[in-house]
Image (cartoon, rainbow, N blue to C red):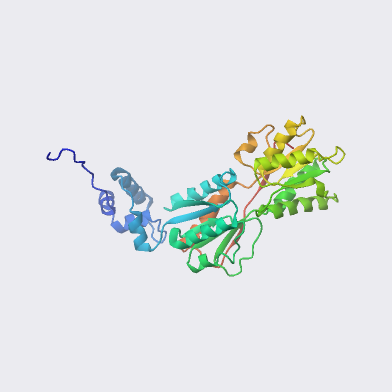
Amino acid sequence: MGNRGKTLRKARATQADVARLAGVSQATVSYVLNNNTSVSVPVETRQRIHDAIQQLGYIPDRNARSLRTSKTFTIACVIPDITNPFYPAFARGVQDIADVQGYDLILYNTDGIAEKEQKCLHSILQGKADGVVATFSHLGLTELQPLYERNIAVVKMDVAPVDVHDLPVDVLYIDNVEAAQTAVSFLIEHGHRRIAMIGGTDAPPRDTRLLGYRQAMAARQLVTDELLIHSGDFTQGSGYRAMRDLLDLPSEIRPTAVFAANDLMAIGALMAITEAGLHVPQDIAVVGFDDIPAASLVNPPLTTITHFTERLGRRAAEMLLERLNGDVHAPGRDEAMPYQLIIRESA
């Protein structure tokens, strides 16, 4: 048969090939590929290297790189619910920064279940990642100690300031108490006095957002009626059911406004109100939390708290990589991120 049936394979380009074509040393190519900031490489030189990489179709050998550095060049992102639109947007922000820095991203979904969080922790400890950005419902700073001991960088997403003491862990948070106060105060300023709360269960935002609701009511000397506080599980269906229960209350104590602890539950509440033949916001105003993409698409568009989800993910990844790249050696940082009330037509 001679050479018939044989597939001719093009030799894989190497760093040395890139260096020859770009007219630089192989070390300079390595500096650029590894985003090494300790060596200054002129912009023109970087461009020649990137042009050579594209022309040759060069693909870095991740395994060889890992062997040289004892790093996986992988970041783990742990989230509680991949079906909640907030978290894919957050993960997108993490990946944007990881891509630029030459890191892969693996995603763990825990459903907010303690056993699944432990399983993620064990997986990461087996050498699956150099660092982790995580939203944990059950694991605190103490439970993450094995990660610190293995020099695995950690950025923990939280709902309030956290005293990290001398631990090498960074905490990024939105002040959920203050944000919830802002949402409820807006309803009070618009004349509402009987304001219901659809809170969550078994997840960190639950207590802080409920506390913000209570503090906003107390600040205006308004009585918090426990009949108006209902729990959901942060899904649209639970918001719908909670709103149905609120609508079943006698008309004299029925709420004129509802603050939901996330947008999915707020959208469920909108559905229940409309199904009952009532109008938003004329009969009942609704405010949510998160500003997921659907918040601006529902009818009426939802007034809600945004915490700039992708920006949050990007900052989390930046903090993680600052520690992985050796730019930060101090004990853990505690950093607040901004939020804003987005006023639309539901309130």
Taking the view exactly as shown, the residue that stands out farthest to the top is 277
Taking 82 as reference, is 329 above or below it?
below
Q: Of 27 and 146, which appears nearest the observer? A: 146
Q: Is residue 337 visible?
A: yes
Q: Of 248 and 51, which appears nearest the observer? A: 248
Q: Of 205 and 59, which appears nearest the observer? A: 205
Q: Is residue 185 visible?
A: no
Residue 78 locus on image (x, y percent): 54, 54
Q: Quadrant of the N terminus?
A: top left
Taking 55 as reference, is 150 above or below it?
below
Residue 61 locus on image (x, y percent): 33, 53
Relative placement, left or right, of 146 versus 71 is right
Residue 194 locus on image (x, y percent): 83, 43
Relative placement, left or right, of 246 versus 71 is right
- Residue at image coords 59%, 54%: 113
Q: Quadrant of residue 273?
A: top right
- Residue at image coords 36%, 54%: 62
Residue 316 locus on image (x, y percent): 54, 54
- Residue at image coords 59%, 47%: 309
Taking 344 as reference, is 138 above or below it?
below
Q: Quadrant of the C terminus?
A: top right
Taking the view exactly as shown, the residue that stands out farthest to the right is 252
Q: Quadrant of residue 188?
A: top right
How many numbered callouts? 0
Taking the view exactly as shown, the residue that stands out farthest to the front is 115
